[in-house]
Amino acid sequence: MTDETKLDTAILPDIALPELGRRSLGGLGLAAVAAAAVGATATASIVASTPARAQSSGDTIKVGILHSLSGTMAISETPLKEVMLMLIAQQNQNGGLLGKQLEAVVVDPASNWPLFAEKAKQLLSVNKVSATFGCWTSVSRKSVLPVFEQLNGILFYPVQYEGQECSRNIFYTGAAPNQQAIPAVDYLMNTEHVKRWILAGTDYVYPRTTNKILEAYLKSKGVASTDIMINYTPFGYSDWQGIVSQIKSFGSSGQKTAVVSTINGDANVPFYKELGNQGIKATDIPVVAFSVGEQELAGIDTTPLVGHLAAWNYFESVDAPANAQFIADFKKFANNPKRVTNDPMEAAYIGFNMWIKAVEKANTTDSDAVIAALPGVSVPNLTGDYSTMMPNHHITKPVLIAEIQATGQFNVVSQTPGLVVAQPWSPYLPESKDLIGDWLAPMSCGNYDVVKGKCLGAKSA
């Protein structure tokens, strides 16, 4: 029996009891519950800050948490598990949902994409979760998508992605390309006057599709093929010396050059270190990243990186009362004043609150009823506005461009004047330029061809 198998049947109070004591569980604060929950690995079922009367699974509403807590994506995904546990604990302290306490069921797919599908099936078929919050990489989302569609589950996906997908069973609270990648390129083009482009990404579906869209977009703006360099590296790549040398050489033509980075996970740490080692400053070749936030910069010397950019829909440095409260709550929950918050955590926060509101609206956790109730739901985001779930199962978001500071935080230098509605299907690719998604009746279609006037059929695409 593996350690993971052993933990599949574990319940947090049983995991934590040797340290916490069952008698004291009802009086635990958020920080104490967090400390226990953060230490739990693999699969565990958790009722955070739950009164004893509601701890049996029959009295709870189960919520799946499907994030890599080990492997190359753990650096990015572990904080998402933590923020979900915090939100569930807060909801329970406020009375739960429909008169029941929420019970988190945590699984660890270990950065193993096929394992994501197995864990998703377990959450839906064995644990009977009402909704799942999870995945980071698009390859993991692609792995679980058929499971959620076949078993009619609900997945909230909290990370920016490449688009070209619109599933009835997935609610995308991260950015579509027109809510991150396209505005970032526009900023570099119009403000930094960039003429040459290096599209650097990890070798999987998100960077490849995003770069395909960006290459088409750049060419539509008159950029020549010879002024676009595209490079891919494996997950966890660490030997950046040669590639950074190529970037330096490509950027030495005399024309302003920028790197558009879709590098994912812990490969970012040695990438940024090598930029510093080779003296590439933001004033020479700026890097704009789509997968680097406060979490990825934590623990590395950002002094050589000052001025490099990131495009997101949230930064920890956003000055808004709701954000200040969220940051304070998370630091307290994690029992660590040095912890940081980032964009996918905000997207998880938005998705969770949308699900709560939709369940209350439907007065049930039944999948069909909640899926029908979600479009039109609006909840506060952390930048001082409201985000709305649209009929295409994507949300409205502001777009922010920010510079890295020596503190590891970001200084926002550009923000859209209002919220941007997501376009899951790219108008810059021939195969998708006529497609829209709309899951409300009578269309009820993820890929409706507005020219042919018909739904192309597949559930997700």
Image: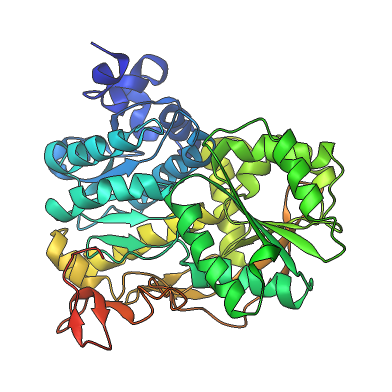
Quarter of the picture containing the C terminus is bottom left
Quadrant of residue 110 in the image? Answer: top left
Q: Which residue is at 29% across, 36% downward?
A: 114
Q: Viewer-proximal residue, 34 or 287?
A: 287
Q: Which residue is at 56% across, 67% downward?
A: 215
Q: In this orientation, does residue 401 appear?
A: yes
Image location (x, y in percent) of residue 18? 37, 14
Quarter of the picture containing the N terminus is top left
Q: Viewer-proximal residue, 413 or 407?
A: 413
Q: Residue furthest top?
A: 1
Looking at the rendered structure, the number of numbered marks drawn on it comes to 0
Q: Which residue is at 23% across, 60% downward?
A: 169
Q: Is residue 353 above or below residue 58?
A: below
Q: Is residue 447 above or below residue 197?
A: below
Image location (x, y in percent) of residue 336? 61, 35
Q: Viewer-proximal residue, 292 or 199?
A: 199
Image location (x, y in percent) of residue 28? 42, 33
Q: Viewer-proximal residue, 361 or 292?
A: 292
Q: Is residue 366 left or right of residue 381?
A: left
Image location (x, y in percent) of residue 241? 74, 34
